[in-house]
Image (cartoon, rainbow, N blue to C red):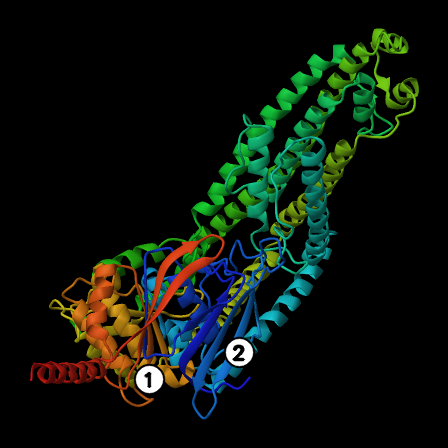
């Protein structure tokens, strides 16, 4: 694509784009220095500005989606939008045609073609080009980089030197290599314990998660179609990265959310999952919900024999059913085991709190402090001679002397042994708790099935007297014997089959997570492994930080002061055109260094009296925003690729006293001589009184053009109704009127004589 600089958009054709719901293109004459868009709200003016922004900058704001009109298709298959323009470019005697086609995409960004048809210079990000040329009153936070910015102005003003780029690329490669090496080393350590490596666990977890995802999606569809049961739906990739077989970093949280949704739907009285619920706990809650779903499905089966067959299909062939007289004792044992599990859980929690109590997320823990005092305390007391002003505070030295007087070696040794004892006991109790929870859960499920099966046997006695013999015997009943009496099981219910498939996937996933818990518990007992893990984690964190945009190396490279100063001066020159209160000008920029921000450092604006952006009024923010966009436009115009400025609803935030100043500024920009200074300006005005005032101020001088696009109506079928008018230049109108006056006067005189 030929990226010649665009100086004017001479005409526009728009169809099926946002408010332009029309199937046939609306053709608009925009061949003027100023194009004023007037009319009430909701008639499509901002849609036109958005179309222009997409055409010239290749950028759209997420707040404007969907881009394709919701009523565009209309049953005729035209589910795309088109924007076409005739533009005037430098270095070309003929006008050029630009055409963009847009198709919305439900699962990602819209498809915009051709992708290389936009104006910005290859070094200028499209979002930044839009922020330097298109003013939106409702999106000022984007201009000031307060939210949602994918690219920062500083990243463009401060391109990284090649040596820095080389270093950052090397860090990224080292990060990948380090991860591969870590998996290998830790895998070797884990294998010594007879447990699978972490990489093996991860691969098995991904397979289990994929099986669960597929089975769950199938169950949701079947439950809605065959059982009229609405289960919590999830998108196909809710556990995985898009177009990848790797689990998302937040997969455990997504699992907790699904467990909470299942409980709310199927077991509303059940305790909800905790915010920090680990994956095994979330999976057990889902499994519990599936048992309840299965019970509801079985209850809906009309025949008792069919329900009995469905229950028997879920049990192993070597199962012996508990008779009714054994149920009370089993319930008592389960209750006792639950009480014991609760006590174990409380003990584990207490020991976890003890372990964390002497830790320090922001620095060394208590053991490290004791060791440091032991190893360095004597040296610290040997303070070099210094003047009184530079001597350490006496209370600090006194405390240090008192601290090192103790047997620090013995204290450190005792404390380390105590920590090891607490950890060992916690791991031991945790293993007991995991085993007990599983046993109790299985016993509860089995007892409930026994009760259901005996209840159904009672219902079919009159059809099959053999069941009475088994019940009256009072002995445990073997499953093969019961199946033999019942006869052929026949075809299983489709919905029950889907439930069982999900339950099998959940059970397999629980097995993997429990194996991972055991692996972690066993490895935590090895001091060497834990030290290696801590070292590995610290190096991994350092590489993670240095591989990002907010790395120390990246943040240390600041843009040249003269670049920022020049931008400040340009903004101040424009701001001074307004009537400002004291303390606003001159403004100054500060680079905000926040390591929590993932998209680079924003350039924050402060007033002369050091007020931040948030302290300004709506009108002052609008004045500053207009000054910013004009300052950036004139500073970076050669990178933007076009000389078009669009101002959407810029006048709303200004009072009548400021409007003449704003209009004078726009007038100077639009009617300036020379390609270097002149800009084609599109202005959106929603209020009739403001529009009339703007017309008074913006009437073009001789040789300049102004057009009005009056949005007079809008209909759901045809979109906006637009009246197109041309404003006659002031001097030209005066000259014409003078000639008419002379001729009229002459005719009057001749008629009178």
State the residue position of label 1: 560
Using a 10 Å C-alpha cutoff, classify the residue at mark 2 as few (fewer than 14 neighbours), some (14 to 19) or many (20 or more). Answer: some
In front: label 2 or label 1? 2
User: Residue 148 placed where, x, y %?
Assistant: 42, 62
Up/down of 202 relative to 307, above or below: below
**Residue toward you, 431 or 128:** 128
Examine the rendering and report whether any part of residue 393 can be seen.
no
Examine the rendering and report whether any part of residue 94 can be seen.
yes
N-term mark: 2 or 1: 2
Q: Quadrant of residue 558?
A: bottom left
Element class at badge 2: loop
Residue furthest front as drawn: 753
Dividing the image into 4 quarters, which one contains the N terminus?
Answer: bottom right
User: Residue 39 placed where, x, y %?
Assistant: 32, 60
User: Residue 663 placed where, x, y %?
Assistant: 21, 72
**Residue toward you, 375 or 326:** 326
User: Residue 288 placed where, x, y %?
Assistant: 65, 31
**Numbered mark located on residue 503 in the image:** none
At 79% from the left and 11% from the top, the residue drawn is: 459
Dividing the image into 4 quarters, which one contains the C terminus?
Answer: bottom left
State the residue position of label 2: 117
Q: Quadrant of residue 402?
A: bottom left
At 41% from the left and 53% from the top, the residue drawn is: 407
Q: How many marks?
A: 2
Using a 10 Å C-alpha cutoff, classify the residue at mark 1 as few (fewer than 14 neighbours), some (14 to 19) or many (20 or more). Answer: few
Up/down of 599 relative to 642, above or below: above
**Residue toward you, 628 or 210:** 628
Q: CA distance from mark 2 to mark 1?
A: 33 Å
Q: Quadrant of residue 278?
A: top right
């Amino acid at each position: 694509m030929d990226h010649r600089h665009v100086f004017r958009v001479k005409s526009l054709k728009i169809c099926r784009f946002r408010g332009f719901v029309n199937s046939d293109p609306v053709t608009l004459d925009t061949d003027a220095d100023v194009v004023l868009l007037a009319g009430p709200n909701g008639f499509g003016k901002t849609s036109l500005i958005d179309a222009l922004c997409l055409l010239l900058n290749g950028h759209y704001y997420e707040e404007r989606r969907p881009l394709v009109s919701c009523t565009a298709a209309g049953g005729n298959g035209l589910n795309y939008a088109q924007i076409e323009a005739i533009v005037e470019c430098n270095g070309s005697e003929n006008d050029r045609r630009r055409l963009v086609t847009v198709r919305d995409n439900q699962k990602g960004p819209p498809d915009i073609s051709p992708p290389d048809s936009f104006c910005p210079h290859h070094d200028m990000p499209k979002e930044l080009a839009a922020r330097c040329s298109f003013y939106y009153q409702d999106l000022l936070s984007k201009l000031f980089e307060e939210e949602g910015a994918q690219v920062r102005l500083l990243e463009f003003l401060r391109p990284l030197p090649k040596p820095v780029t080389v270093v950052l690329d090397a860090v990224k490669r080292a990060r990948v290599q380090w991860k591969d090496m870590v998996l290998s080393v830790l895998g070797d350590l884990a294998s010594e314990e007879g447990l699978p490596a972490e990489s093996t666990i991860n691969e098995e977890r991904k397979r289990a998660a994929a099986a669960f995802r597929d089975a769950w999606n199938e169950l949701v569809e079947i439950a809605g179609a065959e059982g009229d049961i609405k289960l919590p739906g999830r998108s196909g990739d809710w556990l995985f990265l898009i177009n990848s077989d790797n689990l998302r970093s937040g997969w455990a949280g997504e699992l907790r959310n699904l467990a909470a949704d299942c409980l709310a739907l199927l077991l509303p009285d059940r305790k909800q999952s905790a915010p920090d619920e680990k994956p095994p706990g979330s999976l057990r809650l889902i499994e519990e919900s599936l048992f309840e779903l299965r019970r509801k499905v079985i209850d809906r089966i009309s025949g008792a024999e069919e329900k009995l067959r469905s229950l028997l299909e879920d049990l192993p062939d070597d199962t012996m059913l508990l008779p009714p007289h054994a149920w009370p004792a089993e319930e008592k044992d389960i209750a006792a085991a639950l009480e014991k599990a609760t006590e174990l859980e409380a003990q584990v929690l207490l020991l976890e709190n003890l372990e964390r109590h002497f830790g320090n997320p922001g620095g060394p823990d208590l053991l490290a402090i004791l060791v440091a005092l032991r190893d360095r305390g004597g040296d610290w007391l040997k303070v070099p001679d210094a003047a009184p002003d530079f001597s350490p505070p006496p209370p600090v030295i006194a405390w240090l002397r008192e601290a090192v007087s103790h047997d620090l070696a013995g204290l450190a040794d005792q404390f380390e042994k105590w920590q090891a004892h607490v950890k060992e006991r916690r791991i031991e109790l945790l293993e007991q708790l995991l085993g007990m929870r599983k046993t109790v859960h299985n016993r509860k499920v089995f007892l409930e099935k026994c009760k259901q099966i005996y209840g159904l046997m009672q219902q079919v006695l009159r059809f099959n007297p053999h069941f009475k013999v088994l019940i009256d015997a009072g002995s445990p009943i073997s499953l093969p014997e019961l199946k033999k009496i019942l006869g052929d099981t026949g075809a299983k219910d489709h919905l029950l089959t889907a439930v069982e498939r999900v339950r099998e996937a959940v059970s397999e996933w629980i097995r993997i997570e429990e194996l991972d818990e055991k692996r972690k518990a066993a490895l935590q007992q090895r001091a060497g492994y834990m030290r290696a893990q801590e070292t590995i984690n610290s190096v991994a964190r350092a590489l993670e930080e240095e591989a990002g945009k907010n790395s120390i190396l990246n943040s240390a490279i600041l843009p040249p002061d003269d670049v920022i100063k020049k931008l400040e001066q340009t903004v101040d020159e424009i701001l001074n055109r307004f009537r400002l209160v004291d303390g606003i000008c001159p403004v100054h920029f500060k680079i905000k260094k926040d390591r929590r921000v993932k998209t680079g450092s924003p350039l924050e604006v402060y007033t002369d009296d050091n007020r931040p952006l948030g302290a300004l009024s709506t009108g002052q923010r609008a004045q500053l925003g207009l000054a910013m966009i004009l300052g950036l436009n004139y500073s970076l115009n050669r990178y933007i690729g076009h000389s078009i400025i669009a101002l959407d609803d810029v006048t709303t935030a200004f009072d009548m006293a400021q409007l003449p100043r704003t209009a004078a500024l726009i007038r100077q920009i639009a009617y300036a001589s020379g390609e270097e200074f002149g800009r084609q300006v599109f202005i959106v005005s929603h209020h009739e009184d403001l529009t009339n005032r703007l017309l008074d101020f913006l009437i073009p001088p001789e040789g300049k053009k102004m057009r009005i696009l009056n949005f007079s109506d809008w209909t759901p079928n045809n979109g906006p109704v637009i009246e197109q008018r041309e404003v006659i230049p002031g001097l030209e109108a005066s000259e014409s009127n003078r000639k008419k006056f002379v001729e009229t006067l002459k005719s009057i005189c001749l008629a009178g004589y």
